[in-house]
């Protein structure tokens, strides 16, 4: 039986199809979830995709955080279900307080879209365990409000606990504190990432296929945790 | 009918690049001597009937959970007669 990984579509989500495609290419079954769903339909893990949910009105992710599907998702995430939030999904996870800190407007005010070099700095989370420590990857980055901020104490804690999962290399594209591109929660099942691994899963359309590692990682994690048979 | 005004602003220690960009335009328009600009949001809530203390508490809860993100923003709530 293959793993079933849900991909939530909010009004204004953009990258739900690419995320579902990445899930499929990694070898799992992609299950479309709708923002108004009251249940998660028994999926083993969830991806919150990128885009502009609710037009980014109020604050990025602030309205999506109160969508009906988020209630079972937040409960399941607290109980250990793997959740990956990419870009807008990362913003939603911060607004939901599943991850600490917040994403703010890029310090240079411009929307940025480029192939970004990253260093993987955590190989134990549910979404990064198929990478090597300090492995360099290249995946697309595209955001207007991708500056990761948190107070100094939280930043120190994230670093001390190995919860920074990826850092920007070469240049910091958005003013994120301490070059942070992604973080995880204390248990390692919830990961937020500003760049887009789902756009780097096929040679035809991506700069690399480095992004696949996030999706194969969660499959490995589900097998290890006995959620799915190998 | 009463009005409740909720003002939301980034905390002082959070960089406000929009405010800085606005400040940059001041000089081009000839205004000098402004050392800082912070940009915020204002929500004007029209409330049916009187704003009771209980209603005000509910509004403060909404201001704290939805209208502002306490990680990066402060808010004030003001009742207008």
Image (cartoon, grey):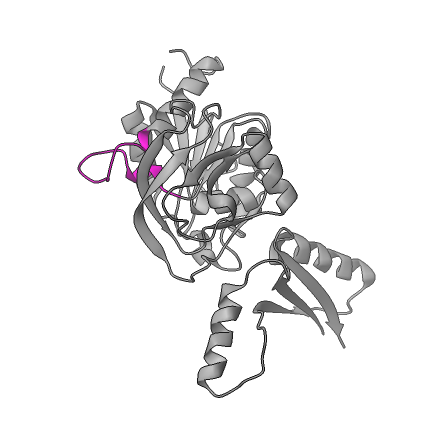
Looking at the image, residue A31 sits to the left or right of residue A160; the answer is left
A52 and A140: which is toward the camera: A140
- B79 and A34: which is toward the camera: B79
Q: Check the image and report above or below for A216 versus A48.
A: above
Identified at 58% across, 67% down, the residue is B41
Q: Nearer the viewer, residue A43 or B75?
A: B75
| Picture coordinates of residue B2, whole percent (x, y) | 72, 73
Point 45% across, 32% down: residue: A46
The span shown in magenta is A195-212
Q: Residue furthest front?
A: A170
Magenta span contains residue A199? yes
- Answer above or below: position of A63 versus A201: below
> How many marks do you count on the picture?
0
Residue A187 location, quadrant:
top right
Q: Quadrant of the N terminus of chain A?
A: top left
Residue with the most extreme right position: B53
With respect to residue B55, does A1 lie above or below?
A: above
């Amino acid at each position: 039986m293959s793993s079933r990984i849900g991909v939530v579509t909010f009004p204004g989500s953009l990258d739900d199809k690419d995320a579902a495609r990445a899930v499929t290419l990694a070898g799992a079954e992609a299950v479309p979830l709708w923002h108004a769903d009251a249940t998660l339909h028994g999926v083993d893990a969830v991806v919150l995709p990128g885009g502009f949910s609710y037009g980014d009105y109020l604050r990025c992710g602030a309205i999506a955080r109160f969508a009906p599907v988020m209630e079972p998702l937040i409960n399941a995430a607290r109980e250990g279900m793997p959740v990956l939030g990419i870009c807008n999904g990362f913003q939603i996870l911060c607004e939901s307080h599943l991850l600490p800190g917040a994403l703010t407007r890029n310090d240079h005010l411009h929307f940025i879209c480029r192939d970004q070099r990253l260093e993987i700095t955590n190989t134990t989370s549910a979404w990064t365990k198929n990478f090597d420590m300090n492995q360099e990857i290249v995946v697309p980055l595209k955001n207007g409000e991708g500056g990761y901020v948190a107070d100094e104490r939280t930043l120190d804690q994230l670093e001390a606990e190995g919860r920074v999962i990826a850092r920007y290399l070469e240049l910091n594209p958005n003013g994120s504190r301490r070059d942070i591109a992604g973080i995880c929660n204390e248990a390692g099942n919830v990961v937020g990432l500003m760049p887009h691994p789902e756009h780097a899963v096929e040679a035809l359309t991506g700069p690399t296929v480095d992004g696949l590692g996030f999706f194969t990682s969660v499959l490995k994690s589900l097998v290890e945790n006995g959620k799915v048979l190998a | 009918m009463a009005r409740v005004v909720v003002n939301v602003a980034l905390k002082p220690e959070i960089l406000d690049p929009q405010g800085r960009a606005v400040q940059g335009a001041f000089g081009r328009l000839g205004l000098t001597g402004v050392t800082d600009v912070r940009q915020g949001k204002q929500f004007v809530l029209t409330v049916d009937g009187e704003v009771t203390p209980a209603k005000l508490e509910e509004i403060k809860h909404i201001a704290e959970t939805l209208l502002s993100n306490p990680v990066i923003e402060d808010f004030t709530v003001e009742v207008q007669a």
